[in-house]
Image (cartoon, rainbow, N blue to C red):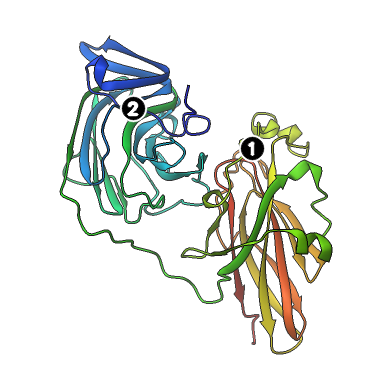
Amino acid sequence: MRTLIAALALLAPLLVHAQAWDLQGKAELVEHQGRPSVFLNGGAAILKDVELRDGVIDVDVSTPAARGFFGIQFRISEDGNNGEWIYLRQHKSGQPDAMQYTPVLNTGLNWQIYNGPGFTGAVDIPKDAWFHLRLEITSAQAKLYVSDMEKAALVMPDLKSGLQKGSVALASLTGATYFSNFQWRALPDSEWKRQWPPMPPGTLTRWSLSPSYDALARNLERPLSKAEADAIPWEDVEAEAPGFVVLNRYRESPHPRVSFANDFSKRLDPQPGMKVVYARTRIDADRDQVKKLQLGYSDDVSVFLNGRILYRGRSAQNFRDPAFLGIMDAENDALYLPLKKGRNELMLAVSELGGGWGFIARLVALPGE
């Protein structure tokens, strides 16, 4: 079975006729509450022979599950490893993150990186009753309507995968969910236009990335030697506004089984499958000085300056406390860089445990400067 975009990240579509759907995982055609339906619970229904750029998707949904993740995936790449996903969470009904949009990049979900306005929103999710979803996709923007077809529940001003077309799917990561009355129609292609947020001053945007390595096979508190750094085939990248370096864009996403997800006492245990990427940049200083570095990362980082370790931290979901989400933001953490006059090398060792692999770094002036 094709990977449901790494641990069920990209799923499938559905008409009402069996020949219209490629059913994957726990998926079947059934009758529910008097309607022919597609049932998903850890599965997907991919619409066969459809490649959609701009369009409108309508579907009714009913879910008896107390907890779950279900929704629509669109612009799915041919290999199923990239795309867009908008999903709802029954157990979050009415809360600020009851619905979430995330791009899927190299099989990795990225909800810890892309969060807040344009990505999450509150909505009421009925229990075991039919309600309607409508997704309108235009260029690099989309709108999701839930029950109320006059006012969008979530406006997505900038779709992040970068894909302009792809297949469509209905999906349930977990939680019994029924879909019925599915319809779709294409719209004329509109001008492709991204709507990037502003890039704040002081953001470090030019980085070089190493390949990914087994994090448990390396001493992440030890800086790379010059010989090790010289032997690495570095890849130059530019941060995307507002300063994110999303490693899942450049490296296949790892999917470790995180032991402390359900047992807080295991949060300091080694996590098999964790990968690390080294990222380096140059900071030029006109004199010896101390600069404040605002740093966000997902999910584990070591910070080295001029070959010396300054900081090590972990900001993974469930790590700092059992309800901690690990949302990435430039103001998550701060440290102080003792810069020398001339060229300085800042290096990060960033590891992923789930929910998005990346970092954001911004220099800010100290008070009085």
Asked whether, in this view, residue 77 is left or right of residue 129, the answer is right
Q: CA distance from mark 2 to mark 1?
A: 35 Å
Relative depth, front residue between 171 and 217: 217
Q: Are marks 2 and 1 in contact (CB under 8 Å)?
A: no
Image-quadrant location for residue 29: top left
> What element does badge 2 sit on?
strand
297 versus 130 height, above or below: below
Q: What residue type is disc 1 on?
A: Pro
Q: Amino acid at mark 2?
A: Ile
Q: Position of residue 284 (x, y in %)?
A: 67, 82
Q: Quadrant of the C terminus?
A: bottom right
Residue under circle 1?
Answer: 322
Work out whether residue 225 can be spotted. Answer: no
- Identify the residue at image location x=69%, y=40%: 274
Mark 1 or mark 2, which is nearer the start of the sequence?
A: 2
**What is the secondary structure assignment of the residue under circle 1?**
loop
Label 1 neighbourhood size at 10 Å, few (<14), some (14-19), many (20+)? Answer: some
Q: Name the one closer to the observer, 35 or 233.
A: 233
Which residue position holds label 2? 46
- Say above or below: 170 vs 54: above
- Residue drawn at x 73%, y 38% is 267
Query: Residue 37: where, in percent of width, then height?
Result: 26, 16
Of residues 229 and 121, which is closer to you in this image? 229
Q: Does residue 139 show up? A: yes
- Relative height, residue 112 to residue 66 (above, below): below
